[in-house]
Amino acid sequence: MYFGEDPLFGLLRRIGKPVAGHRPWPRYATTAGGWRTMIEALGGNGWSLLGLWAEPGTVHAAIREDMAGDLAVVSLDCPDGTFPSLSAARPGAIRLERAIQDLFGLTAERLTDARPWLDHDRWGVRRPLSDKPAAPMPNPPPYTFLPVEGEGLHQVPVGPVHAGIIEPGHFRFTCNGETVVRLEEQLGWVHKGIEGLMRGKPVEDAAKLAARVSGDSTVAYSLAFAQAVESALGVAVPPRAVWLRALMAELERTANHLGDIGAVCNDAAFAFMLAELSRLRELVARTADACFGHRLMMDRVVPGGVAVDISEDGPARLLELVAELRRRFPPLVAIYENKASLQDRTVGTGVVSGSLVNRFGAGGHVGRASGRGLDARRTPSYAPYEDLEFEVPVRTEGDVNARVWIRICEVEQSLGLVEQIVKRMPGAPRNEKGERPLPRVPVEGPGGEGMALVESFRGEILVWVRVNPDGTIDRCHPRDPSWFQWPLLEAAIEGNIVADFPLCNKSFNCSYSGHDL
């Protein structure tokens, strides 16, 4: 692959040496000085931090030059257990650096917030993924929330257990009357040890773990993991499998957006929209079950292809689904747009500025609602989206209403994509027995490193993987879009009233499970 003389690869050639066997984008090993030069570049406009993760003695950063869309990984050995912090240039790195400290024992120099993040002193071990795990602290102190000073302030603790059937997360509100002065989150309550569980697993078993990082994004996570493994091993997937994967991804996107639009309206006390949009989401789930044998399409995307082909009547069912949603969805959109009580709650509520979205590198509906129009299906792109026609909706208001409208527009685009895929997908050849062979190839190779960037309904999912020659996973790091979105929820609620928090929170709909790994 030729990368040309663009800013990113010019920088990488100056600060490091390429590491062989990393695909499809290069990985460069650098020094502490080169790492600091990379941090300076990240501090400028037009650069993104895509991910930050570690393994014993080494830290890795995935970076992107947004204009050209070029990606690379930069690696730094940390013999003394420290590395220069990226947080001054990219504040979205703070929580990732705290997680690295908890899991691997590597410390970011000059990290502005060194409190534990994922480790709640309940694991029975500290630094579990390091070469030398330590015993737990005998008398761990309670988590220290940031101090707030001022007259008339009071705190409202919420969670980690909530009234609804949702995952746990703690929110500490500091308020002046009803107005929120500061919101501080404490997450990590559903840490599952995904990275540690994947080590030594055969690719097929690790794929099932990837599919369960965040269940509402099971297709997107499965696709990202599969693409990363296939890149690492140089495996070419059958064309029909590529199109089937995209079909499942768009069904997943549609179902989640329909549910979220209804849930936002419900939090604005308009339950009618939740009921009607839940019916449409159920229609998508039932169609997915009829086409692929699972309502969430879990474990249907696998390394090497797909685990099932679409049912014989699947294409016809999907076209019927598109027609039905195009008939029933627009009237509900009109109700949302013209209902004064809804507009009063969503317009101007929970605003996130474009500058903050860019500094944190937030994507998905959160980023696009505040003017950051990046979409991994377009840049860097992956098959078959370069052959499909669709738009990436962008708004600039950055409020709850804008995030709802991004979802509305994405539903409309996904319906068009489903229609295109059904009509253009390669046919399924039959063997001499009249059977359709499964579009899947063996996942074999000498080992290697791979990375993938896939657009989920929340935004970009990054998966980095190293595969051993025997077909087992040496290291794998999945990065959920929520890592760069959760901090912005704290900014969105500031200056709003406490009663608007559920509305703001649902308009983000960040993943607890995907974040907590």
Image (tube, rainbow, N blue to C red):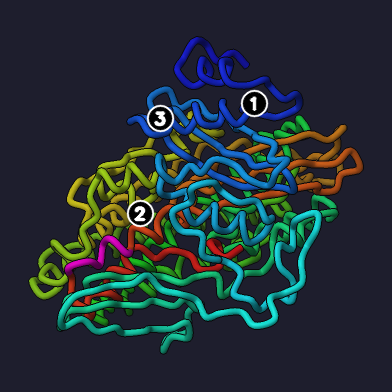
Label 2 packing within 10 angstroms: few (<14), some (14-19), many (20+): many
Q: Disc 2 on helix, strand or loop?
A: helix
Residue 59 in percent (x, y) is at: 64, 42
Marks 2/1: CA–CA distance: 39 Å
Q: Is residue 363 visible?
A: no
Residue 330 in percent (x, y) is at: 24, 60
Residue extent of the magenta highlight: 490-495
* 474 sits to left or right of 265: right
Q: Disc 3 on helix, strand or loop?
A: loop
* Mark whose residue sits in front, 2 or 1: 1
- Whether residue 491 is in magenta: the answer is yes
Marks 2/3: CA–CA distance: 25 Å
Q: Give the quadrant of the N terminus.
A: top right
Residue wearing tag 3: 66
Label 1 packing within 10 angstroms: few (<14), some (14-19), many (20+): many
- Label 2 with label 3: CB-CB less than 8 Å: no
Marks 1/3: CA–CA distance: 19 Å
* Observer-nearest of 21 and 230: 21
* 462 sits to left or right of 389: right
- Whether residue 26 is in magenta: the answer is no
* Observer-nearest of 146 and 26: 146
Comes first in the chain, label 2 or label 3: 3
- Label 2 with label 1: CB-CB less than 8 Å: no
Comes first in the chain, label 2 or label 1: 1
Residue wearing tag 2: 411
Labelled disc at residue 435: none
Q: Callout 3, which amino acid?
A: Asp
Q: Is residue 172 above or below residue 397?
A: below
* Observer-nearest of 474 and 342: 474
Labelled disc at residue 28: 1
Q: Disc 1 on helix, strand or loop?
A: strand
